[in-house]
Image: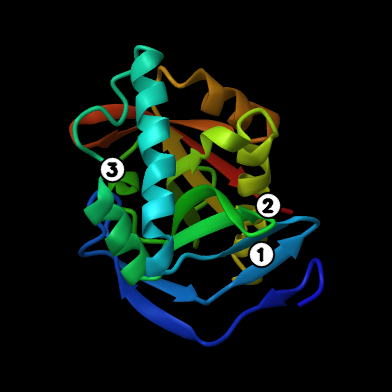
């Protein structure tokens, strides 16, 4: 497959949940593959699980070292990532074959987003992503921004023009990235009993 090419087989229905991967009704069209330069964005497979979890473990440790309470309570864990993959929601960004970043992608039906102290920009279909993490070996290369750009392309391929996300109040790196990429702060949502800053980006 040449650079900048895509593959989009037929759609399937998955049951997902933002925290556990269980119980949410979403639709995915995959496996989706987007190649750009040396990076490829593709659906994760079960063989990727050890590499993905290594990336998440590193991210969890870095958040702890930063003094954050984000991801310090046993979430995410290998079972969550395994369920992401099994339900078709796990995606990886690869650098010449090496997994460099991970995220879980969902379409619609994010329960926590139904109640917001604020207001979303749109009221139609949306893509939401969770569990974003970049490999320690790839830090400082702008891969988080690359990953979010690929998520935008994923949304467009599914004819969806709204992307929603949330993060901790004490995650300045992600907050700066949202600002840089044109996300709008919409208010607060609650995940697992804790408030989170909620953002939306409307694609052209």
Disc 3 target residue: 76
Q: Does residue 137 lie above or below 129 as drawn? A: above
Q: Residue at x 18, y 32 (%)?
A: 193
Classify residue 198 by image quadrant: top left
Along the viewing direction, whichever of 83 and 52 lies nearer the viewer: 52
Is 117 displayed left or right of 51 in the figure? left
Is 89 displayed left or right of 101 in the figure? left
Q: Secondary structure at mark 2?
A: loop
Classify residue 150 by image quadrant: bottom right
Total labels: the figure holds: 3
**Comparing labels 3 and 1, the label whose residue is closer to the camera:** 3
Mark yes or no: residue 119 visible. Answer: no
| Mark number displayed over residue 156 | 1
Q: CA distance from mark 2 to mark 1?
A: 8 Å
Q: Are marks 2 and 1 in contact (CB under 8 Å)?
A: yes
**Who comes first in sequence, dot 3 or dot 2?**
3
**Comparing labels 2 and 1, the label whose residue is closer to the camera:** 1
Quadrant housing the N terminus? bottom right
Along the viewing direction, whichever of 10 and 47 lies nearer the viewer: 47
- Horizontal and vertical percent position of residue 40: 67, 60
Q: Residue at x 33, y 19 (%)?
A: 64
Q: Residue at x 52, y 39 (%)?
A: 135
**Comparing labels 3 and 2, the label whose residue is closer to the camera:** 3
Residue furthest bottom in the image: 10
- Horizontal and vertical percent position of residue 147: 62, 47
Q: CA distance from mark 3 to mark 1?
A: 28 Å
- Horizontal and vertical percent position of residue 55: 44, 42
| Mark number displayed over residue 203 | 2
Q: Residue at x 61, y 31 (%)?
A: 139
Q: CA distance from mark 3 to mark 2?
A: 29 Å
């Amino acid at each position: 497959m040449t650079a900048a090419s895509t593959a989009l087989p037929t759609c399937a229905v998955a049951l997902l949940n933002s925290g556990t991967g269980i119980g949410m009704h979403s639709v995915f069209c995959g496996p989706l593959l987007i190649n750009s330069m040396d990076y490829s964005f593709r659906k994760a497979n079960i063989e990727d699980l050890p590499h993905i979890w290594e990336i998440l473990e590193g991210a969890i440790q870095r958040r702890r070292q930063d003094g954050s309470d984000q991801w310090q309570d046993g979430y995410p864990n290998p079972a969550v990532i395994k369920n992401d993959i099994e339900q078709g929601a796990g995606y990886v960004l690869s650098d010449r074959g090496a997994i460099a970043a991970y995220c879980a992608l969902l379409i619609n039906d994010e329960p926590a987003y139904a109640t917001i102290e604020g207001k979303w920009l749109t009221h139609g279909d949306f893509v939401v992503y969770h569990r974003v993490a970049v490999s320690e070996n790839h830090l400082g290369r702008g891969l988080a921004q690359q990953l979010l750009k690929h998520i935008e392309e994923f949304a467009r391929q599914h004819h969806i023009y709204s992307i929603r996300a949330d993060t901790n109040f004490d995650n300045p790196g992600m907050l700066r990235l949202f600002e840089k990429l044109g996300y709008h702060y919409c208010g607060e949502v609650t995940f697992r009993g804790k408030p989170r800053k909620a953002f939306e980006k409307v694609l052209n």
